[in-house]
Every structure is written in structure tokens, then in C-alpha cells.
Amino acid sequence: MLNIYVAIIAVMLLSITVSGGAYTRQDRSFVFILSVILVLLTADSLSKLYLPGPVGLWVKRAGTYLIFSGDPVGYLASLIYIDSWTSGRKDRAERFLYGMVYGYVFLNLTLVTVSALFDLRWFYDYHGYMYSRGSLFVARGVLNMGFCAIISLYIFLRRSQIRTNYKVVVVFFPLIILASGFLQVFVGGASYEYAGSVLACLLLFLKVQAHNIDDDYLTGLLNRRGFVRELEYQCSHYHQDHPFLVYLIDLDFFKQINDISGHQTGDEALIRLSGLLRDTFGRNAKIGRYGGDEFVILSFDHDTQQAEKRLEELRNRCDDFNHQGARTYRLSFSAGYAFYSPEIYPEIEQFFHHIDHLMYREKESHHALRVAEKHQTEEYSVP
């Protein structure tokens, strides 16, 4: 019953986050945590399920194996979530702690699998349908709590990178899991660890996720602050084998849309264009509203040909939208883009200034073309 109640809460948090778009690193890592917890809750329920016959015993064993082999992934998911609130390169100590958690995940999977295959009974045992703890159960539980402490140490080392108003909640997140893990190991009888994990996620949702100030209130994309944080993160982790570029896209003639059709229609145009940007660039891109009618996209396209193909696809989507029934406005845009290189752009401001210059060159040509078309229309209309 505890698993059922906890699973309902986890599903609700997951559905709310996913329905909101889950565009930020924080959202995606939060979805990852909840997904891991739901898998482990399902496995825990299977391990407690009674079905007669060999199939029932196999289901119980499979559920137990998934729990023991997979629960350290929850610690890794927690670490990834905490890391999503920080930016900048990790120092040597931080990289070492991160590597320890990754190493423990794979070591635990290996040991649990070997124990299950060769019936070594290190972590758990079955006498018929009766489950019992293995010889290394407590040692493994203590080790799990140690890794919760490592996550807390990691937070301490990167505390200056976490926003002040979120710092207390993020710090207490692994401590709640640590306390529930202690109950799981030394008290037992219920899934305290998973219940504690969902409680910690609920606290994160109420105090952090639901008040994410990186979201744009109108479009649901990243706002300027959120995008700059994503860009700083990618620049600090740049590697030439994994290039990325930034597009700056400006909605053409936005002032005319507002003046002629009103600000509500202008807002609708921004929302429509933001939807086309999502459809064109996909979930892997970081898309933000930089301000007013300007949008920015950080994408991992590999070359100029692919970048031009993206823009052509966006133009086609705008054309399709413009031909769908009578519209009081049309969607068109001006764009500039550039691939990031720390050698060419030692400062992010230089990088953005270059892209902005390219975008405004195209915008001026669009306006010049619009003026020429208007003059031509006026000439034909003269009797």
C-alpha cells in the first residue's frame, strides 16, 4: 500500500513536469529521478507479489534483482539533478567524487549480477518463497548511505554555484534519502528508501521546480537568464569533437502586428513561433526567448549545411502556418547563427555580438524587400 501511494505521487509529479515541456536541464534531470524511482517501486512491488508456481517465484526473484542492481542509479540521478543547478567546470575533487558514484553504479551491478548468476547469496536469498538478507546486505546498505554522504559533500564543494534561494532545499535533498536509507537497512519492513526519495522529490517540486525562474512566462521556453546559464554551461564544457552553434531569430514586423492587431495577437504570434521552433529544433536543443520578439537556440548541428537546412525547415513551417486560413498576421523571421569556438570568441559577449550582427543584416534586407514590394504595389494601383 505504501508503494501504491508513493507511486501515485511520483506519477503526478512526473506528468506535471512532462506536460510543462521539460525543456531545462533541471526539468529533464528531475524527470530522470522520478523515472528511476518508479522503476524501482515497480520492482519492489513485484518482489512482494505472491503468485503460485514457478512463474511467481521467478517474478519475485526478478523484482529483487532489479532493486539490488538498480537502486544506486537513484544516487547517480540525484547527483545529475544537483549538477543541473550548477555551472562551470568541475575541479579535480569534484570530478573524483562524480567518478566514484559512476564507478559504484557499475561495480554494484556487476557484483549483484555475479551473485545472482552463481547463487552466491551475497545480498539476498530465497528459501522457496521466503526472502532473507544476504551476508553482505548490511555492508552494502552502509555503502549506499556513504554515497549519499558523498553527494552531500559534492553539494558542499559546489555550494557557491547553487542559487541562494534554492540552496537549502537542494542541500537537504540527499539528506532525506540518507535518513530513509538508514531506516531501510536497520529497521526494514517497508520501502522507506523509495518513500523518502519521493518525499524529497515532492519537496523539490514545491520549493524549486514549481518556481523555476529560468522559464519564460509567455512561451514556456527558457527566458534570457535561463538560456545564458545553459550557454555558459556548454561553453565551459566545450570540446571540438562535440560542436554547437547558436541561432538568433527575430520575428519580422512584430511592431506592426502589435500596432494593427493588438498586443494579444502579438503574444499569439510569439507563442506560435515558439511552437514552430520546438518542432524544428527538437528536444535536444536549448530554446529560449531572449527578449521581446527575439529567440535564441543552442543546437548541436554539425555543420553549416545542417544549420541552413534547419532554417529552411523553419521557413517552410512558417509558410505552412501562413497558408492555414485567414490570418491577421504572417509569421516570418530573420536569423543569424555561428558555431562556438573558444579560440575565436574568448568572451561570450563577443560570440553573441557576432550573431546579433548577422541577424540584423538579414533583418535589414527583409525590411528593404518589404519596402520595395510596397512601392511596387502602389505603382500598379495608380490609375
Image (spheres, grey):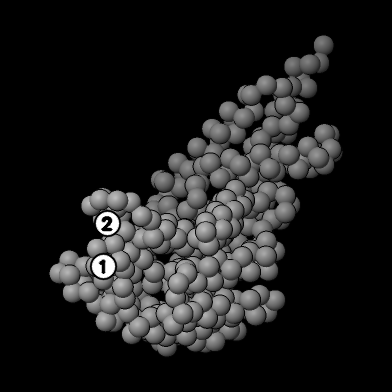
Residue 193 in percent (x, y) is at 48, 72
Instruction: Name the residue furthest top.
Output: 383
The residue singled out by tag 1 in the image is: 126
Q: Which sits in the foreground, 88 or 191?
A: 191
Residues marked 2 and 1 touching at CB (< 8 Å): yes
Q: Position of residue 18 (x, y in %)?
A: 56, 51
Q: Which quadrant holds the C terminus?
A: top right
Rendered image quadrant of residue 321 = top right
Residue nearest the observer in this picture, 356 or 120: 120
The answer to whether residue 100 of the structure is visible from this angle is no
Residue beneath the point at 56% across and 45% down: 278
Relative placement, left or right, of 269 versus 68 is: right
Image location (x, y in percent) of residue 137: 32, 79
Amino acid on which the number 1 mark rests in the picture: Tyr
Q: Disc 2 designates what residue? A: 57
Would you say 268 lies left or right of 81 here? Answer: right
Instruction: Residue 328: name its quadrant.
Output: top right
Which amino acid, by three-letter code, is at mark 2? Leu
Q: CA distance from mark 2 to mark 1?
A: 9 Å
Tell me if mark 2 has few (under 14), some (14-19) or many (20+) residues whose alpha carbon lies within 10 angstroms of its own: some
Q: Is residue 14 left or right of residue 62?
A: right
In this picture, is 47 found above or below 179? above
Nearer to the camera, 285 or 181: 181
